[in-house]
Image (cartoon, rainbow, N blue to C red):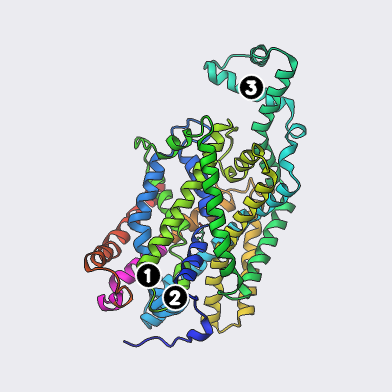
Amino acid sequence: MSQPDNKQSDRGSFGNRLGFILAAAGSAVGLGNLWKFPYLTYKFGGGEGDQHGAGTFVFLYLLCIALVGLPLAIAEILIGRRAKKSPVGAFKALRPGSLWRAVGYLGVVTGFIILSYYTVVAGWATGYVAKSVTNEFANYESHVSNETVYDRILQETREAQQDQSISKEAALAQFGAKYPDSEAYDNAIKEKKLEAYPVALFSDFLSSPYKLIGYFLFFMLLTVGVVLGGVSGGIERWNRILMPALFLMLGILAVRVLTLPGGTKALTFLFKPSFSDISIEMVLFALGQAFFSLSLGMGALLTYGSYLKKNERIGASAVAIVSLDTTVALLASIVIFGSIFSYGLVMKGSGIGNLFTAIPVIFQHMPGGRILTILFYLLICFAALTSTVSLLEVVASTLIDERGMKRRTAVLTGAGVITLVGIPCALSFNVLSDFTLAGKTVFDLFDYFASNIALPLGGIGIALFVGWALTRAEKREELPELATPTFRVWNFLIKYLVPAAVAIVLIATLMGQI
Ligand code: PHE
């Protein structure tokens, strides 16, 4: 077999398997788990309307992870390690002169798109670090007007009594009658303000184009700084401490909210499927989210795989990455919905801000909450950074390998273009919020296209390549540790089930739209 010419020493490699797992898990664990999964579960669980629960969506998601995500993660790492190249180069090296390299190019374009809007959300997390430092979350009393609270009381009373004709005066009188004196009444109004505050604060934040662009640029610079330093620089070391710290904090918060009254409603909301609400749109989103969350289908795992040493086990690494990623997504949702239900938070809008509205409330109710809030949003920024780094690394390593650019030029060129594309995404929440196509803002369109179409398409390409273009002997050489039956199951999934299932979902969606 002709090994492609690899300059392993120039490309660098991971110190050991743990280094690879941490970097790959760092790519996988990010805003996809902490921000997007809780946002989608809210959307498919009924959101502010009829909250019938997201059980069906969560079930579909887990199914996609097990049947599509895991086999594909193995396939992607395998290609990378065999070729020791970035995505485009890898396909060229393994099957010279073929059209397979198109899969690599698609991945690079997808990386561009994801990075542009992903960094906007990472900017929100940065802004929330600043808000935690200045303790803005404590200012709810002066921030929420009495009118807002009265409206909410009216709405709650109407809902509770299922009577839309109740007047505001009547609702307020009923509310007031529950409290013996004016002090108790004032406290109740205060509590209502606290419930409404996070949503008000977040929409305030989104309405400022300068802030959003500022934090976006800041985060982009941070990413550029890390990628300029090369893969196995400081970030790998930080990963070892900060990833477990994030995990630990999520674990503690989950226990905390689940022991509060009403907190366990989060479990019913997330895990009790009804199946009557299933739709092709839901299947598409579950699949797209599996791709997005695992960093699959655009060559990120492939690129990290290219730095993996020959004697490391791909299968076991993939299982570790996938389990970790899924656990973080579920924990984050438990924490967020636990907080929403136990503190009776106002559910409003698309749920896109769940990560930013629910978390500060938990900490407001905890001793040392201010420090913990700062720490938590810092960890979120770090998780986002390890993901943006992997995205920019794909773009940069392609420019280096394919265009012969110097690392510096490649990183700056890539990031420069992505920044220009990202600005309209940041403006989608304010100046450009009315600029929509099929009801979607630029931000939504990018997210929809990248997660639900481009990544799954890339996934089909990768599955077909590994399933049909690589020989059994080539695959066996990369996966010597898999027992024969396990190898066969994996090979079957990659050859038939993954490409067919993903294609069916994509085609069904397309047909649904015409
Ligand atoms: N998986 C990352 C997350 O969950 C996002 C990402 C997608 C990173 C694709 C790289 C490639 O946040």
- Viewer-nearest of labels 1 and 3? 1
**Residue drawn at 54 percent across, 39 percent down:** 256
Residues marked 2 and 3 touching at CB (< 8 Å): no
Q: Amino acid at mark 2?
A: Leu
Ligand 1 contact, mark 2 (Cβ < 8 Å): no
Q: Is residue 245 visible?
A: yes
- Viewer-nearest of labels 2 and 3? 2
Disc 1 secondary structure class: helix
- Residue labelled with disc 2: 308
Does the magenta run of residues contain 99? no
Total numbered labels: 3
**Residue 240, image quadrant:** bottom right
- Residue labelled with disc 1: 314
Magenta residues (range):
457-476
Residues marked 1 and 2 touching at CB (< 8 Å): yes
Gap between marks 1 and 3 measured at Cα: 56 Å
From the top left corner, tell me how far across and down residue 455 is, in percent. Answer: 44, 61
